[in-house]
Image: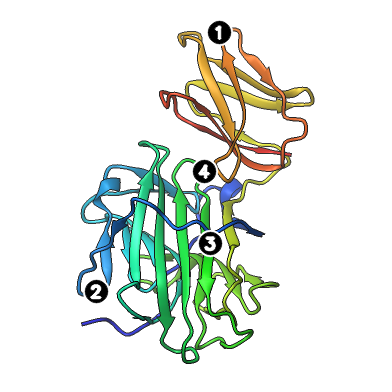
Amino acid sequence: MRPILTLPIALSVIGASAQNTYTFERTTAPYVPLTGAVTCTFDDGGFDEINELDGQVFELFGQNFTLGSPYSMVIGDWGFLRFDRTASAVVLDGLFTELEAIDAGSTVEYLLTGSPGSYVLTAQWTNWHLAQGPADNYASWQISIDQATGIATVHTGPNSGGGLVFNDQTGPNCGIFHANASFTQCLGRVWVEGDPDEPTVDRASTFDFDALHAFPPAGTVYRFLPAITGVAQITPLPPYTAYVAEDGLHVKPLDSMAAQDLQLVDATGREVLRTRVGAAGAVLPIQGLAPGVHILRAVDGSAAPVRLVLP
């Protein structure tokens, strides 16, 4: 039997002081339905365990979530992703609320791309009716999480629109939050509320979950990026040392490393530059690149990625 609809599940502000919250940005991009996706199979509680990610580590709110029984990552049929560990849980809500199937075309699917350490999971809800909204409303959307960058995304697809047809109680809930294991304490939250075109972003660590008052227009992208304080900071991970200077991004492999082909990708996963780095290292040009989170990684996936922020 499905439990009563509540919202004590959250995306968090916890852990290292340099990465204790998420920044929010609203952009637009064409909505492309998944191809080759797997249809979700939900249990009586409305969960589908994604066992393909068992053994993987995701960093959320500055904390490591190591996946695997009994804490496999799950997709929730009412529109969310959830990560659990012994001490706490993180939930990413897309257009979360009580959902009703419209017809045989109402589906929930997921697609896993990438490789261990750099997986991207995208879940997709197609053609669903929000039970508390006006008659004939419908919406489609995707939620994705990038393991390498920690970036979470909600991407809205075709929907019924209709203006501000919801309120805080009837509308869909959207955001990310972190709660303790019993959901009695909110550890951190970035919540998107009100008008989806000019949303209010609530970062208070409470369980006060107000809703969106309308469907975001098709193609709307809400992106939640792990925040790193400072103008240009790099968290070096073996086997590279790296730092930003006025002349570019300095990268030097450890002495024992052979030459490597490296790529720099932006927050959307798009490659923005590529170079071969030998034992002497290299200076990568970053002038003209967009500021914000980027990932430096080996093209062949043989080296751990380095997350950095360009000024």
Query: Which label was assigned to residue 45?
Result: 2
Residue at which label 1 appears: 279
* Numbered disc in front, either 1 or 3: 3
> What is the quadrant of residue 162 in the picture?
bottom right
Q: Position of residue 302 (x, y in %)?
A: 41, 23
Foreground pick, 236 / 128: 128
Q: Residue furthest front?
A: 104
> What is the quadrant of residue 194 in the picture?
bottom right
Foreground pick, 18 / 299: 299
Amino acid type, callout 1: Ala
Sequence-wise, the earlier of marks 1 and 2 is 2
- In this view, 26 is above or below 234: below
* Residue at 59% in and 72% down: 216
Q: Could you tell me which secondary element the residue under label 2 belongs to?
A: loop
Mark 4 near mark 1, Cβ–Cβ under 8 Å?
Answer: no
* Numbered disc in front, either 4 or 3: 3
Sequence-wise, the earlier of marks 4 and 3 is 4
Q: Could you tell me which secondary element the residue under label 3 belongs to?
A: strand
Sequence-wise, the earlier of marks 2 and 4 is 2
Query: Which label was assigned to residue 149?
Result: 4
Q: Position of residue 287 (x, y in %)?
A: 77, 30
Amino acid type, callout 3: His
Q: Could you tell me which secondary element the residue under label 1 belongs to?
A: loop
Amino acid type, callout 2: Gly
* Numbered disc in front, either 2 or 3: 3
* Residue at 40% in and 67% down: 125
3D distance between C-alphas at marks 4 and 3:
17 Å
